[in-house]
Image: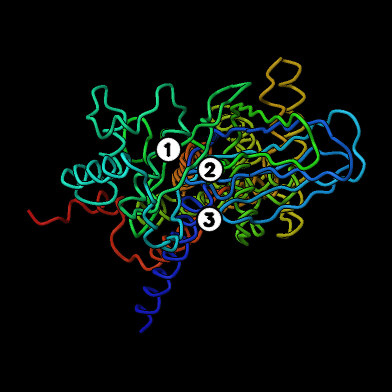
Amino acid sequence: MKRLHLTLLVLGLLATSLALVVYKVNVLGFPLKPAQTVDNWVVEARVAFEPSGGALTARLALPDDPPGFGILDENFISRGYGLTTAQQGENREAQWTTRTPSGRQVLYYRATVYELNRERPAPPYPGPVSVPDYDEPYRSAALALLDSVRDRSADITSFASVLVSDLNSPAPDENAALFIQRNASDADKVRTTIELLAGARIPARMVHGITLTDWARQAAPLAWLEVHNTREWVPINPHTGTAGYPDNFLVWWYGDREPLLVDRANRPEISFAVTRNIHDAIDVAEQRAQLMDSRVVDFSLFGLPVQTQNMYRVLLMVPVGALIIVLLRNVVGIQTFGTFMPVLIALSFRETQLLGGIILFTLIVSLGLAIRFYLEHLKLLLVPRLASVVIVVIMLMAGISILSHNLGIEQGLSLALFPMVILAMTIERMSLVWEEHSPADAIKQGLGSLAVAAVSYLIMINRQLEHLIFVFPELLLIVLALTLLLGRYTGYRLTELLRFRALKAP
């Protein structure tokens, strides 16, 4: 039962940790690599008009959950205007109102968007549309064209694609040529296609959007076609008939309408501009979590003050170092002084660097051990003896720092970062092993402690690992699970296999 309990506990820890990590990566977009950036675009709509007198209302179509993108932030620049946003049919609109405008008016809408591929709820099927009442000869040509397209298509999507291809063919047949207008705009082409699709009772609509580029002062909206295949709206290129939107195409509004509608105003104008930015992926993920009202970020380390965050970037690596010690002691069989002393020494190596830290640690422990042997002759009690060792260690650290500074060796200044109490306990423990066992055992454990500290340091300074632990602290549950599993390890240690290799059967 106890073994089953441990197994269930470990599986629960692993499942919880992995579930949180997968959610934060796939849903919120937290990066798995340090210093990772995310592309986003700032799109701006500039609205200008001249009031003609009286109360004024200006309505602007806004992006609303555009496919393939998410909206991080929105700003409205409209001093002196009342502002409301509401859903009007298929579009979301901003409505500016004012009572007594004077002079030319300029309003701005600005949004920050980023790529976001997610499952969208399936829209309801609008049902078959009514067949238009074509006049002759358009009626006969439309029916003949639709019959020809139907024979060469397999479903609604391919029907629309074949029809668009026929209308854009360099050598159209006589039926398609009747509906082709010379120098027709994209919107005119889409209108013609929608009218012909209605002859086959296929629901279709016009979509307007802009292409997100690195920089565009004047981004012209593009008209696109969408048809409903009874399950979802499928975008169709009005020039080629291919399904799908082009890369970086931001859907702005739906329907055959103008994006800007202004009452009591002359010469209304609207222009679009685009610029590309690069933001830190973590900042974007935090904003995304706020927009999604996710409670996960409320319990993240990013809400702490920066100084506290920097402290936890170091502290969160201690469990990793503890796991390394458990592995090296219980599986490999390396002997050390104490359990956590190598981890604390490894943390000190972060400032002193590895080689300098090993030299300083060896020097201070050697000098302290000599002083400890001298104190043994004074026959002191345990607590005063430990206190004396701490005092001597601090004096030695200060003396070495002063000497190294005068010699121009700046690494010696970081000696103050060594945990002095741990150094004192190491000296005391080493002296006891020296007296009770042998100098060889004391030196072996001292070298083992340095080796474990060095391995822990090399792992704990890994930038990728530090990033993962700080951004996904739930990974410590995996560290805990592995530690619990190693706590039940009762097999041979690697050093014991070498030690007793002579007993191996021939």
**Disc 2 and disc 1 in contact, CB within 8 angstroms:** yes
Q: Quadrant of residue 47?
A: top right
- Looking at the picture, how far across and down is residue 27, in whole percent? 49, 53
Residue named by callout 3: 339
Q: Which is nearer the N-term, disc 3 or disc 2?
A: 2
Which residue appears at 85% of the width and 35% of the height?
A: 52
Q: Which is nearer the N-term, disc 2 or disc 1?
A: 1
Question: In this rendering, would 143 be left or right of 44?
Answer: left
**Disc 3 and disc 2 in contact, CB within 8 angstroms:** no
- Looking at the picture, how far across and down is residue 452, in whole percent? 47, 44
The residue nearer to you, when weighing 270 against 327, is 270
| Amino acid at pointer 3 | Thr
> Looking at this rendering, what residue extends furthest in the left direction?
506
Q: Secondary structure at mark 3?
A: loop
Q: Which is nearer the N-term, disc 3 or disc 1?
A: 1
The mark found on residue 324 in the picture is none
The residue nearer to you, when weighing 422 against 13, is 13
- Looking at the picture, how far across and down is residue 435, in whole percent? 54, 51
The mark found on residue 190 in the picture is 1
Residue named by callout 2: 256
Task: Residue 439: tell me if it is visible.
Answer: no
In the rendered view, tell whether residue 60 sits above or below residue 222.
below
Using a 10 Å C-alpha cutoff, classify the residue at mark 2 as few (fewer than 14 neighbours), some (14 to 19) or many (20 or more). some
Which residue appears at 41% of the width and 33% of the height?
A: 189
| Amino acid at pointer 2 | Asp
Cα–Cα gap, marks 3 and 1: 74 Å
| Amino acid at pointer 1 | Val
Which residue appears at 74% of the width and 56% of the height?
A: 380
Using a 10 Å C-alpha cutoff, classify the residue at mark 1 as few (fewer than 14 neighbours), some (14 to 19) or many (20 or more). many
Q: Quadrant of residue 224?
A: top left
Q: Secondary structure at mark 1?
A: helix
